[in-house]
Amino acid sequence: MGEGTLPLENMPKKGSKTLKPPQRGHISTFKNPGQAPGQHQAVYAAASTGASLAGVAVGGMKAEGFLQSLVILSLFQASVRQVSNEIVRFPPEQLWMDQQRSLMFMQWGQFIDHDLDFSPETPARIPFGGETGCDTSCAKEPPCFPIQVLAASFFQIPPNDPRITNRSGCLPFFRSAATCTQGRVVREQIDALTSFLDGSEVAVAERLRGRSSQRGLLAVNHNFTDRGRAYVPLGPMRKEPCLKASGAARIPCFFAGGIDPCLWSLMANQAKLLTQQQMVVGELRDWLFEQVERIGFDLAALNMQRSRDHGLPGYSSWRKFCGLSQPSGVKSLGQVLRNQNLERKFLQLYETPKNIDIWIGALAEPFVKGGQVGPLMACLIGT
Protein backbone atom coordinates (compact mmCIF):
# COMPACT_ATOMS: atom_id res chain seq x y z
CA MET A 1 0.00 0.00 0.00
CA GLY A 2 1.56 3.28 -1.10
CA GLU A 3 1.66 6.60 0.68
CA GLY A 4 -1.63 8.46 0.49
CA THR A 5 -3.90 5.39 0.56
CA LEU A 6 -6.22 4.61 3.46
CA PRO A 7 -6.75 1.03 4.67
CA LEU A 8 -10.19 -0.25 3.74
CA GLU A 9 -11.24 -0.51 7.38
CA ASN A 10 -10.68 3.23 7.72
CA MET A 11 -12.77 4.17 4.71
CA PRO A 12 -16.17 5.82 5.39
CA LYS A 13 -19.02 3.38 5.93
CA LYS A 14 -22.12 3.58 3.77
CA GLY A 15 -24.39 6.27 5.18
CA SER A 16 -21.61 7.91 7.17
CA LYS A 17 -21.42 11.68 6.85
CA THR A 18 -18.14 12.50 8.55
CA LEU A 19 -14.56 11.29 8.42
CA LYS A 20 -13.12 8.87 10.95
CA PRO A 21 -10.04 9.86 13.01
CA PRO A 22 -7.63 7.83 10.84
CA GLN A 23 -8.94 9.71 7.83
CA ARG A 24 -8.63 13.09 9.49
CA GLY A 25 -5.04 12.15 10.28
CA HIS A 26 -4.31 12.24 6.57
CA ILE A 27 -5.34 15.89 6.35
CA SER A 28 -2.13 17.83 6.25
CA THR A 29 -0.07 20.22 4.22
CA PHE A 30 2.95 18.90 2.40
CA LYS A 31 6.28 20.41 1.38
CA ASN A 32 8.08 19.00 -1.62
CA PRO A 33 11.50 17.49 -0.78
CA GLY A 34 14.25 20.01 -1.39
CA GLN A 35 11.92 22.99 -1.37
CA ALA A 36 13.70 26.00 0.07
CA PRO A 37 12.19 27.80 3.08
CA GLY A 38 9.73 30.43 1.95
CA GLN A 39 9.65 29.08 -1.60
CA HIS A 40 6.32 29.57 -3.37
CA GLN A 41 3.90 26.71 -2.71
CA ALA A 42 0.66 26.64 -4.69
CA VAL A 43 -2.50 24.60 -4.28
CA TYR A 44 -3.67 21.83 -6.57
CA ALA A 45 -5.66 18.66 -6.22
CA ALA A 46 -5.52 15.05 -7.29
CA ALA A 47 -8.38 12.62 -7.58
CA SER A 48 -8.16 9.24 -5.97
CA THR A 49 -7.14 6.08 -7.70
CA GLY A 50 -9.65 4.41 -9.98
CA ALA A 51 -13.33 5.25 -10.30
CA SER A 52 -14.18 4.44 -6.69
CA LEU A 53 -12.56 7.59 -5.26
CA ALA A 54 -11.14 5.41 -2.52
CA GLY A 55 -7.58 6.71 -2.39
CA VAL A 56 -6.12 9.84 -0.89
CA ALA A 57 -3.41 12.11 -2.25
CA VAL A 58 -1.17 14.61 -0.53
CA GLY A 59 1.46 16.81 -2.08
CA GLY A 60 2.41 20.07 -3.73
CA MET A 61 2.42 21.34 -7.31
CA LYS A 62 4.60 21.02 -10.39
CA ALA A 63 4.41 23.41 -13.32
CA GLU A 64 3.50 21.69 -16.58
CA GLY A 65 3.35 18.41 -14.70
CA PHE A 66 0.64 16.87 -12.62
CA LEU A 67 -1.71 18.24 -10.00
CA GLN A 68 -1.60 17.04 -6.43
CA SER A 69 -3.80 17.81 -3.44
CA LEU A 70 -2.95 18.98 0.04
CA VAL A 71 -5.81 17.47 1.99
CA ILE A 72 -8.28 14.62 1.85
CA LEU A 73 -11.49 14.36 -0.16
CA SER A 74 -14.77 13.72 1.62
CA LEU A 75 -16.88 11.18 -0.23
CA PHE A 76 -20.28 12.30 0.99
CA GLN A 77 -21.65 15.41 -0.68
CA ALA A 78 -24.93 16.62 -2.11
CA SER A 79 -25.81 16.47 -5.80
CA VAL A 80 -23.98 19.28 -7.57
CA ARG A 81 -27.10 20.10 -9.60
CA GLN A 82 -29.16 20.29 -6.42
CA VAL A 83 -26.63 22.62 -4.82
CA SER A 84 -26.82 24.78 -7.94
CA ASN A 85 -30.63 24.79 -7.79
CA GLU A 86 -30.90 25.52 -4.08
CA ILE A 87 -28.04 27.97 -3.52
CA VAL A 88 -26.87 29.41 -6.84
CA ARG A 89 -30.19 29.85 -8.65
CA PHE A 90 -32.13 33.11 -8.28
CA PRO A 91 -35.08 34.70 -10.12
CA PRO A 92 -33.90 36.83 -13.09
CA GLU A 93 -36.13 39.72 -12.03
CA GLN A 94 -34.04 40.02 -8.86
CA LEU A 95 -30.82 40.64 -10.79
CA TRP A 96 -28.85 43.69 -9.64
CA MET A 97 -26.01 45.18 -11.65
CA ASP A 98 -22.68 46.34 -10.22
CA GLN A 99 -22.59 50.15 -10.26
CA GLN A 100 -18.79 50.30 -10.03
CA ARG A 101 -17.47 47.49 -12.27
CA SER A 102 -17.83 46.55 -15.92
CA LEU A 103 -17.91 43.09 -17.44
CA MET A 104 -14.19 43.50 -18.15
CA PHE A 105 -13.54 43.12 -14.41
CA MET A 106 -15.03 39.62 -14.55
CA GLN A 107 -13.42 38.76 -17.88
CA TRP A 108 -9.96 39.82 -16.75
CA GLY A 109 -10.25 37.52 -13.75
CA GLN A 110 -11.19 34.65 -16.03
CA PHE A 111 -8.29 35.45 -18.34
CA ILE A 112 -5.82 35.37 -15.44
CA ASP A 113 -7.26 32.08 -14.18
CA HIS A 114 -6.90 30.48 -17.61
CA ASP A 115 -3.27 31.59 -17.77
CA LEU A 116 -2.40 29.72 -14.57
CA ASP A 117 -3.85 26.25 -15.04
CA PHE A 118 -5.58 24.02 -17.54
CA SER A 119 -6.55 20.41 -16.96
CA PRO A 120 -7.44 18.92 -20.35
CA GLU A 121 -10.20 16.36 -20.48
CA THR A 122 -9.34 12.82 -21.40
CA PRO A 123 -9.42 12.43 -25.21
CA ALA A 124 -11.58 9.32 -24.90
CA ARG A 125 -15.24 10.07 -25.60
CA ILE A 126 -16.66 6.64 -24.73
CA PRO A 127 -16.27 4.44 -21.63
CA PHE A 128 -13.20 2.25 -21.70
CA GLY A 129 -14.38 -0.97 -23.30
CA GLY A 130 -17.81 0.50 -24.07
CA GLU A 131 -19.56 1.57 -27.24
CA THR A 132 -21.90 4.44 -26.26
CA GLY A 133 -20.45 7.93 -25.97
CA CYS A 134 -20.27 9.76 -22.65
CA ASP A 135 -22.27 12.66 -24.08
CA THR A 136 -25.27 10.44 -24.86
CA SER A 137 -25.04 7.82 -22.12
CA CYS A 138 -25.49 8.22 -18.38
CA ALA A 139 -23.17 5.32 -17.55
CA LYS A 140 -20.81 6.24 -14.73
CA GLU A 141 -17.81 4.46 -16.19
CA PRO A 142 -14.39 6.08 -16.76
CA PRO A 143 -13.87 8.51 -18.36
CA CYS A 144 -17.60 9.34 -18.03
CA PHE A 145 -18.49 11.05 -14.75
CA PRO A 146 -22.04 12.30 -15.44
CA ILE A 147 -24.30 14.33 -13.21
CA GLN A 148 -27.05 11.78 -13.50
CA VAL A 149 -30.36 10.51 -12.12
CA LEU A 150 -29.86 7.59 -9.75
CA ALA A 151 -32.17 7.21 -6.77
CA ALA A 152 -29.42 6.06 -4.41
CA SER A 153 -26.60 8.20 -5.74
CA PHE A 154 -25.24 11.52 -4.53
CA PHE A 155 -24.52 12.34 -8.21
CA GLN A 156 -28.22 12.48 -9.07
CA ILE A 157 -30.13 15.34 -10.66
CA PRO A 158 -32.58 16.30 -7.90
CA PRO A 159 -36.37 15.92 -8.03
CA ASN A 160 -38.36 18.92 -9.31
CA ASP A 161 -35.43 20.27 -11.28
CA PRO A 162 -36.63 23.52 -12.89
CA ARG A 163 -35.23 22.57 -16.28
CA ILE A 164 -34.23 18.89 -16.51
CA THR A 165 -37.46 16.90 -16.47
CA ASN A 166 -36.17 13.61 -17.92
CA ARG A 167 -35.57 11.51 -14.82
CA SER A 168 -33.46 9.06 -16.82
CA GLY A 169 -31.29 11.81 -18.28
CA CYS A 170 -28.07 13.40 -17.13
CA LEU A 171 -25.67 16.24 -17.70
CA PRO A 172 -22.62 14.82 -19.52
CA PHE A 173 -19.24 15.22 -17.87
CA PHE A 174 -15.78 13.93 -18.78
CA ARG A 175 -12.99 13.30 -16.30
CA SER A 176 -9.75 15.21 -16.61
CA ALA A 177 -6.92 13.40 -18.37
CA ALA A 178 -4.56 11.56 -16.04
CA THR A 179 -0.78 11.46 -16.06
CA CYS A 180 1.11 8.24 -16.65
CA THR A 181 2.89 7.70 -13.35
CA GLN A 182 4.60 4.38 -12.68
CA GLY A 183 4.30 2.88 -9.25
CA ARG A 184 1.90 5.52 -7.92
CA VAL A 185 -1.37 4.62 -6.21
CA VAL A 186 -3.18 7.88 -6.86
CA ARG A 187 -4.66 9.34 -10.02
CA GLU A 188 -3.01 12.63 -10.95
CA GLN A 189 -4.34 15.25 -13.36
CA ILE A 190 -2.28 16.96 -16.04
CA ASP A 191 -1.41 20.64 -15.79
CA ALA A 192 -1.07 21.65 -19.45
CA LEU A 193 0.18 25.17 -18.61
CA THR A 194 2.88 26.67 -16.48
CA SER A 195 1.55 27.49 -13.04
CA PHE A 196 2.82 31.06 -13.18
CA LEU A 197 1.34 34.27 -14.54
CA ASP A 198 3.54 34.36 -17.64
CA GLY A 199 1.17 35.05 -20.53
CA SER A 200 1.21 31.44 -21.70
CA GLU A 201 -2.39 31.84 -22.80
CA VAL A 202 -1.21 34.40 -25.36
CA ALA A 203 2.15 32.82 -26.17
CA VAL A 204 0.56 29.65 -27.56
CA ALA A 205 -2.03 31.43 -29.70
CA GLU A 206 -1.35 30.09 -33.21
CA ARG A 207 -3.11 32.98 -34.91
CA LEU A 208 -0.36 35.33 -33.71
CA ARG A 209 2.44 33.20 -35.12
CA GLY A 210 4.12 33.24 -38.52
CA ARG A 211 6.11 30.01 -38.39
CA SER A 212 7.01 30.15 -42.09
CA SER A 213 9.01 33.33 -41.50
CA GLN A 214 12.45 33.63 -39.92
CA ARG A 215 11.83 37.27 -38.98
CA GLY A 216 10.28 36.53 -35.65
CA LEU A 217 7.43 34.62 -34.11
CA LEU A 218 4.74 37.26 -34.53
CA ALA A 219 2.93 37.33 -37.86
CA VAL A 220 4.51 40.01 -40.06
CA ASN A 221 4.27 41.18 -43.65
CA HIS A 222 5.85 38.73 -46.10
CA ASN A 223 5.80 41.15 -49.08
CA PHE A 224 7.09 44.48 -47.84
CA THR A 225 9.48 45.81 -45.23
CA ASP A 226 10.44 49.27 -44.01
CA ARG A 227 14.20 49.21 -44.70
CA GLY A 228 14.44 45.79 -43.12
CA ARG A 229 11.97 46.47 -40.34
CA ALA A 230 8.80 44.43 -40.36
CA TYR A 231 5.44 45.78 -41.48
CA VAL A 232 2.17 44.53 -40.10
CA PRO A 233 0.52 41.85 -42.29
CA LEU A 234 -1.66 42.70 -45.28
CA GLY A 235 -5.40 42.43 -44.92
CA PRO A 236 -7.56 39.80 -46.65
CA MET A 237 -7.77 39.96 -50.46
CA ARG A 238 -11.40 41.03 -50.55
CA LYS A 239 -13.19 44.05 -51.98
CA GLU A 240 -11.79 47.01 -50.09
CA PRO A 241 -10.71 50.61 -50.85
CA CYS A 242 -6.99 49.79 -51.08
CA LEU A 243 -7.53 47.23 -53.83
CA LYS A 244 -9.47 49.76 -55.89
CA ALA A 245 -6.90 52.50 -55.35
CA SER A 246 -3.94 50.32 -56.38
CA GLY A 247 -5.61 49.22 -59.62
CA ALA A 248 -3.85 46.39 -61.42
CA ALA A 249 -1.22 46.10 -58.69
CA ARG A 250 -3.94 44.80 -56.36
CA ILE A 251 -2.22 45.92 -53.17
CA PRO A 252 -4.52 45.39 -50.17
CA CYS A 253 -4.63 47.47 -47.02
CA PHE A 254 -2.46 46.58 -44.08
CA PHE A 255 -4.20 44.50 -41.46
CA ALA A 256 -5.27 47.26 -39.10
CA GLY A 257 -6.06 45.19 -36.07
CA GLY A 258 -7.81 47.58 -33.71
CA ILE A 259 -10.09 46.73 -30.82
CA ASP A 260 -12.39 43.76 -31.07
CA PRO A 261 -16.06 44.85 -30.74
CA CYS A 262 -16.42 42.27 -27.96
CA LEU A 263 -13.94 44.27 -25.88
CA TRP A 264 -15.97 47.45 -26.35
CA SER A 265 -18.98 45.59 -24.98
CA LEU A 266 -17.04 44.23 -22.01
CA MET A 267 -15.85 47.71 -21.09
CA ALA A 268 -19.17 49.48 -21.68
CA ASN A 269 -21.59 47.12 -19.92
CA GLN A 270 -22.00 46.62 -16.20
CA ALA A 271 -21.04 43.42 -14.46
CA LYS A 272 -23.54 41.48 -12.40
CA LEU A 273 -23.37 42.39 -8.74
CA LEU A 274 -22.00 39.38 -6.84
CA THR A 275 -23.89 38.76 -3.62
CA GLN A 276 -24.92 35.75 -1.55
CA GLN A 277 -28.39 36.03 -3.11
CA GLN A 278 -27.23 36.13 -6.76
CA MET A 279 -24.10 34.13 -7.50
CA VAL A 280 -24.41 32.94 -11.12
CA VAL A 281 -26.88 34.14 -13.77
CA GLY A 282 -29.34 31.71 -15.33
CA GLU A 283 -27.69 31.84 -18.76
CA LEU A 284 -24.58 30.20 -17.29
CA ARG A 285 -26.52 27.88 -15.03
CA ASP A 286 -28.96 26.41 -17.56
CA TRP A 287 -27.93 27.36 -21.10
CA LEU A 288 -24.11 27.22 -21.22
CA PHE A 289 -22.87 25.88 -24.60
CA GLU A 290 -26.45 25.03 -25.57
CA GLN A 291 -25.85 25.95 -29.21
CA VAL A 292 -23.11 23.35 -29.64
CA GLU A 293 -24.09 20.65 -27.13
CA ARG A 294 -27.13 18.40 -26.89
CA ILE A 295 -28.14 20.11 -23.65
CA GLY A 296 -27.20 23.38 -21.98
CA PHE A 297 -24.62 22.97 -19.24
CA ASP A 298 -24.65 24.29 -15.68
CA LEU A 299 -21.40 26.14 -14.94
CA ALA A 300 -21.85 25.99 -11.17
CA ALA A 301 -22.53 22.24 -11.26
CA LEU A 302 -19.58 21.69 -13.60
CA ASN A 303 -17.23 23.54 -11.25
CA MET A 304 -18.27 21.44 -8.29
CA GLN A 305 -18.22 18.19 -10.26
CA ARG A 306 -14.71 19.00 -11.47
CA SER A 307 -13.55 19.54 -7.90
CA ARG A 308 -14.81 16.05 -7.08
CA ASP A 309 -13.16 14.63 -10.19
CA HIS A 310 -9.87 16.10 -8.93
CA GLY A 311 -10.44 14.94 -5.37
CA LEU A 312 -10.49 18.39 -3.82
CA PRO A 313 -11.14 18.31 -0.08
CA GLY A 314 -14.03 20.00 1.67
CA TYR A 315 -14.59 23.59 2.72
CA SER A 316 -13.48 23.28 6.35
CA SER A 317 -10.22 21.58 5.39
CA TRP A 318 -9.26 24.48 3.14
CA ARG A 319 -10.12 27.02 5.83
CA LYS A 320 -7.81 25.11 8.16
CA PHE A 321 -5.09 25.22 5.50
CA CYS A 322 -5.48 29.00 5.37
CA GLY A 323 -5.38 29.43 9.13
CA LEU A 324 -9.07 30.37 9.32
CA SER A 325 -11.72 29.04 11.68
CA GLN A 326 -13.23 25.67 10.72
CA PRO A 327 -17.02 25.75 11.10
CA SER A 328 -18.41 22.47 12.36
CA GLY A 329 -22.09 23.18 12.93
CA VAL A 330 -24.97 25.62 12.71
CA LYS A 331 -23.59 28.30 14.99
CA SER A 332 -20.02 28.35 13.67
CA LEU A 333 -21.07 28.27 10.00
CA GLY A 334 -23.52 31.09 10.68
CA GLN A 335 -20.70 33.17 12.17
CA VAL A 336 -18.63 32.70 9.00
CA LEU A 337 -21.37 33.30 6.41
CA ARG A 338 -23.36 35.87 8.43
CA ASN A 339 -26.47 34.63 6.60
CA GLN A 340 -28.88 32.31 8.42
CA ASN A 341 -30.87 31.37 5.32
CA LEU A 342 -27.74 30.37 3.40
CA GLU A 343 -26.31 28.52 6.38
CA ARG A 344 -29.55 26.52 6.70
CA LYS A 345 -29.48 25.55 3.01
CA PHE A 346 -25.87 24.41 3.22
CA LEU A 347 -26.53 22.17 6.20
CA GLN A 348 -29.65 20.70 4.58
CA LEU A 349 -27.59 19.76 1.52
CA TYR A 350 -24.29 18.74 3.11
CA GLU A 351 -25.24 18.01 6.76
CA THR A 352 -21.81 19.23 7.89
CA PRO A 353 -19.59 22.13 6.72
CA LYS A 354 -16.78 19.59 6.28
CA ASN A 355 -18.52 18.26 3.17
CA ILE A 356 -19.22 21.59 1.43
CA ASP A 357 -17.56 21.84 -1.98
CA ILE A 358 -14.70 24.32 -1.91
CA TRP A 359 -15.96 26.37 -4.89
CA ILE A 360 -19.43 27.12 -3.54
CA GLY A 361 -18.22 27.49 0.05
CA ALA A 362 -15.59 30.06 -0.89
CA LEU A 363 -17.94 31.89 -3.25
CA ALA A 364 -20.60 32.22 -0.54
CA GLU A 365 -18.39 33.98 2.00
CA PRO A 366 -18.84 37.71 2.68
CA PHE A 367 -16.16 39.87 1.08
CA VAL A 368 -13.03 40.92 2.89
CA LYS A 369 -12.71 44.67 3.45
CA GLY A 370 -11.93 46.39 0.16
CA GLY A 371 -12.13 43.15 -1.83
CA GLN A 372 -14.48 41.23 -4.07
CA VAL A 373 -13.86 37.79 -2.55
CA GLY A 374 -14.18 36.26 0.89
CA PRO A 375 -11.28 35.38 3.23
CA LEU A 376 -10.87 31.80 1.97
CA MET A 377 -10.75 32.81 -1.69
CA ALA A 378 -8.37 35.66 -0.84
CA CYS A 379 -6.06 33.19 0.89
CA LEU A 380 -6.05 30.75 -2.04
CA ILE A 381 -5.47 33.50 -4.60
CA GLY A 382 -2.58 34.87 -2.58
CA THR A 383 -0.98 31.52 -1.74
Image (tube, helix red, strand yellow):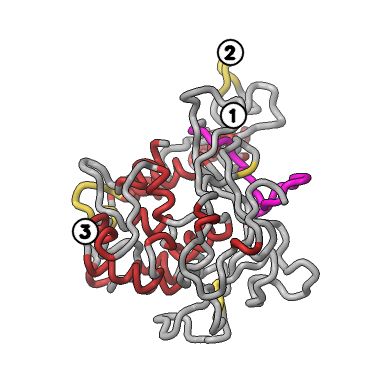
Give the overall secondary structure of the magenta segment: loop
Give the side of residue 240 with respect to residue 351, left or right.
Answer: right
> Where residue 103 sits in the image (x, y, percent)?
32, 50
Amino acid type of the residue tagged 3 in the rendering:
Arg
Single out the mark in the foreground, 1 or 2: 1
> Where residue 146 sits in the image (x, y, percent)?
59, 71
Density class for disc 2 (Cα within 10 Å; few <14, some 14-19, many ≥20) is: few
Query: Which part of the image, by quadrant, shows the C terminus?
Result: top left
Name which residue lies at 23% across and 72% down. Answer: 93
Amino acid type of the residue tagged 1 in the rendering:
Leu
Kindly state the secondary structure of the residue where label 2 is placed.
loop
Proximity of marks 3 and 2: CB atoms separated by less than 8 Å: no
> Where residue 218 sits in the image (x, y, percent)?
59, 29
Q: Which residue is tagged 2?
A: 227
Name which residue lies at 35% across and 49% down. Answer: 106
Name which residue lies at 56% across and 66% down. Answer: 12
